[in-house]
Amino acid sequence: MTLKNYKNRQWLLSSRPKGMVSQKNFDWLESEVQTPKEGEFLVKNLYLSFDPAQRGWMEDKKSYVPPVGLGEVMRASSIAQVIESKNPDFKEGDIIQGIFGWQDFAISDGKGIMNAAHVPADIPITAPLSVFGITGLTAYFGLLDIGKPNAGDTVLVSGAAGATGSIAGQIAKIKGCKVIGTAGGAKKCRWLTEKANFDVAIDYKTADLGSTLQELCPEGINVIFDNVGGEFLNTSLLRIAQNARIVICGAISGYNEEVQPPGPSNYISLIIQRAKMEGFIVLDYANQFKDAVEELSTWVKEGKIVYQEDIAEGLENAPETLLRLYSGKNIGKQLLKVSDPD
Ligand SMILES: NC(=O)c1ccc[n+]([C@@H]2O[C@H](COP(=O)([O-])OP(=O)(O)OC[C@H]3O[C@@H](n4cnc5c(N)ncnc54)[C@H](OP(=O)(O)O)[C@@H]3O)[C@@H](O)[C@H]2O)c1
């Protein structure tokens, strides 16, 4: 690839969102493509990953990763191809994954937050951002290590048609549980029961969650895998069984709220039912990722796990693509194609 005629198009964080994130929080910049120094390599982005947590990274708050600085390229994981290299571990043409951000080209030395890893040749190029990526792994560790499902348990998953929720529910099915998912809209609910092996799917936009759960779970819910928080969590807490495990994976319903709603008033159920509510960050399991990907890939090969990817196109559409997550427009893992490999 000759870079002479190329510019590096970038989306920079220009302001911190108040309430719903918008395109106004980003600036579009076109700059020269940099040349790698000794030990570095240059990549071009092929696919970007979109994650609800990106809204949190835009805030100037203490979190599990530092915030994106104002004027910096918006942080995002991606699949990329090495274009030029002065690093013996990364050769021209290699397909890798890393945190290369909302831009066409990035320079990396393969370490730190720009940590990079090779993508195995025998899997679909986007799978390390979806079923074998952070969302698949979050489902795996959140459900198995925190939720600890037993055969016969009733497991309730919110955000069930999403990248994380859909995998969590299917793992619960593999473990012999009865699985109920909540999702927005009939199309997502149909996919859950017809393709993803869920026993029941509740369209939370039209159903009354409390009475539906009472009907569906007369013995109570043993595991809640919660991606949504807010009203979902509060209502479902009223239906937990004794010794239930509530996995706090995410709370997307509050990510764009200027003022966080008060905590769940029904938390007293935890006392009555001797239940446990626990949060986690998937990155803490990094030393077990390899084994988890192996098990996930066996399940995918056996047809026990299906997954969906929703692929937008064009770097210019990155802010709009991020917004899809918060309006539920994404069907499965939200990605954006930036370019084709050479
Ligand atoms: N703990 C960790 O380490 C970790 C790691 C990765 C992800 N997560 C969390 O996992 C959750 C899912 O992430 P994902 O990447 O898999 O995204 P996703 O579920 O593929 O997409 C987000 C979905 O959230 C739902 N949603 C959006 N706004 C909502 C609202 N106000 N109320 C209810 N549902 C809403 C929408 O589905 P509907 O159309 O069904 O509403 C949307 O499609 C997020 O909370 C994320 O922060 C946690």
Image (cartoon, helix red, strand yellow):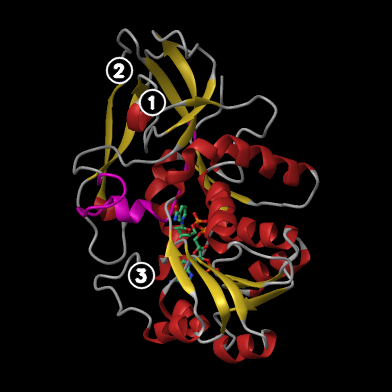
Residue 230 coordinates in the image, percent (x, y): 41, 76
Q: Nearer the viewer, mark 2 or mark 3?
A: 3
Can you tell which mark lies on residue 105?
1
Name the kind of residue labelled 2 in the image.
Gln
Q: Earlier in the sequence, mark 1 or mark 3?
A: 1
In the rendered structure, are the residues bearing label 2 and label 1 in contact, judged by CB atoms less than 8 Å apart? Answer: yes
The residue wearing badge 3 is 254
Main secondary structure type of the part rendered in magenta: loop
Can you tell which mark lies on residue 34?
2
Q: What segment carries the magenta color?
A: 46-67
Packing grade of label 3 (10 A; few <14, some 14-19, many >=20) is: some
Packing grade of label 2 (10 A; few <14, some 14-19, many >=20) is: some
Residue in the picture at 49% in, 79% down: 274
- Secondary structure beneath disc 2? loop
Report if residue 162 is visible in the image: no
Position above or below: 340 against 22: above
Residue in the picture at 44% in, 26% down: 116
- Distance between the alpha carbons at the discs numbered 2 and 1: 8 Å
Disc 3 beta carbon < 8 A from ligand 1? yes
Tell whether position 89 is magenta: no
- Secondary structure beneath disc 1? strand
Name the kind of residue labelled 3 in the image.
Gly
Name the kind of residue labelled 1 in the image.
Phe
- Distance between the alpha carbons at the discs numbered 2 and 3: 39 Å
